[in-house]
Each structure stands twice: as C-alpha cells, then as structure tokens.
Image (tube, rainbow, N blue to C red):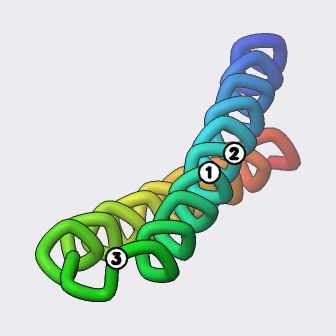
Amino acid sequence: MSESVEKNCQNLISAIKEIEKELHALDKTLWLQVDEQEGNKNRVSGKIGMKDFLLGQIELLRDELAQLDTEKHK
C-alpha cells in the first residue's frame, strides 16, 4: 500500500508541475495578446477562463496529494 501511495504522490506532483507550466505559458500568451490587440476581449476572456480552470485543477491535485500524504502517515 505504501508503495502505491508513494507512486500516486509522485504522479500528482508531476501533474501539478505540468499544470503550473501550462498556466505560466498561458499567462505569457494572455499578456502578449492584451498588449498587441486591445480589441481582443473575447479571446482574452476565454484565456482567463482557462487560467481559472487550471488554478482549480491545481487546487484539486493539491487536495488529493494532501489526502494521500495523510494516508501514508497513518
């Protein structure tokens, strides 16, 4: 069981890092588009929605990681 929990923890940490990379790239693109085209509000709004989604995914993964960590220390 402990090995399985450890593997799940590593997978979650990897997933969090990947989502954080996507979020950083999304931020860069978002601000470049805002600077380049002020009339591009719908596209920017969609990217803000994606950013919120990714932040939510990170939060869910962190909660799951905390739960696995709790199980590991039982």
Q: Do the residues labelled 2 and 1 touch (CB within 8 Å)?
A: yes
- Which of the labelled discs sits on residue 21, or is there none? 2
Location of residue 74 in the rendering, given as x and y in whole percent from the top left corner: 81, 48
The image quadrant of residue 34 is bottom left
Vertical relation: 30 (above or below) 29:
below
Location of residue 25 in the rendering, given as x and y in whole percent from the top left corner: 62, 51
Query: Camera-side residue: 45 or 72?
Result: 45
Classify 10 Å Cα crowding around label 1: few (below 14), some (14-19), many (20 and above). Answer: few
Q: Are marks 3 and 2 in contact (CB under 8 Å)?
A: no
Give me the residue at 62% from left, 62% from top. 28
Element at badge 2? helix
Q: Left or right? Give the position of 38 relative to 45.
A: right
Q: Name the residue under label 3.
A: 37
Q: Left or right? Give the position of 72 relative to 37.
A: right
- Which of the labelled discs sits on residue 56, or is there none? none
**Which is nearer the N-term, disc 3 or disc 2?**
2
Instruction: Identify the amino acid type marked 2.
Output: Lys
Instruction: Identify the amino acid type marked 1.
Output: Ala
